[in-house]
Image (cartoon, rainbow, N blue to C red):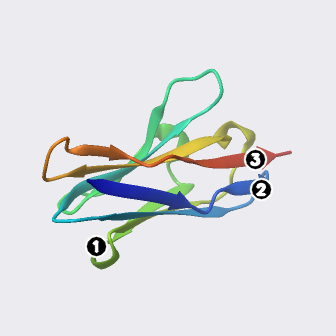
Amino acid sequence: QVQLVESGGGLVQSGGSLRLSCVASGRGFRIKAMDWYRQAPGKERELVAAITDSTSPTYADSVKGRFTISGDGGKNTVYLQMNSLNLEDTAVYYCHARVNYYPYNYWGKGTQVTVSS
């Protein structure tokens, strides 16, 4: 089993910044990809940013130029630097990891990000 724990969420004013972290722990796993998703009230969960060990990061159009995903393989940690936050960024942010053994996909419990005007 792999456990993912997110941190760094909170309340921030529009235009502000937050940095989310997600730490993966467990036994015998190898991370193939780590992603950040978000789900706003009444909306479907959407992919925000993704990173693998072999490809360039990818971003949702709505966050390009404002969010940056990065990883520290040695610490099994992925970060999401969020700048120029706006009201539409308010959501629960979830960390997702794809690993080398069944069930291959793991999710964190999420961290709330609230942007106020």
Residue 80 place in picture, x, y as percent: 50, 60
Amino acid at circle 2? Val
- Helix or strand or loop: what does disc 3 sit on? strand
Amino acid, disc 1 = Gly
Give the vertical position of 40 relative to 105 (above or below). above
Task: Work out whether residue 108 or residue 20 is closer to the camera in this orientation and state it.
Answer: 108
Seen at 74% across and 60% down, the residue is 16
| Distance between the alpha carbons at the discs numbered 1 and 3 | 30 Å
Report x, y in % for residue 87: 74, 40
Q: Marks 2/1: CA distance?
A: 29 Å
**Residue denoted by label 1:** 73
Q: Which residue is mark 2?
A: 12
Say which of marks 1 and 3 sits in front: 1
Q: Secondary structure at mark 1?
A: helix
Q: Which amino acid is tagged 3?
A: Val
Tell me which residue sits at (76%, 47%) in the image. Answer: 115
Q: Mark 2 or mark 1, which has the lower sequence index?
A: 2
Q: Position of residue 50 (x, y in %)?
A: 35, 50
Left-right relation of 15 to 96: right
Task: Please give left or right for residue 27 compared with residue 113 in the image.
Answer: left
- Residue, x 44% and y 49% (percent of image)? 108
Residue 83 falls in which quadrant of the image? bottom right
Furthest-right residue in this view: 117
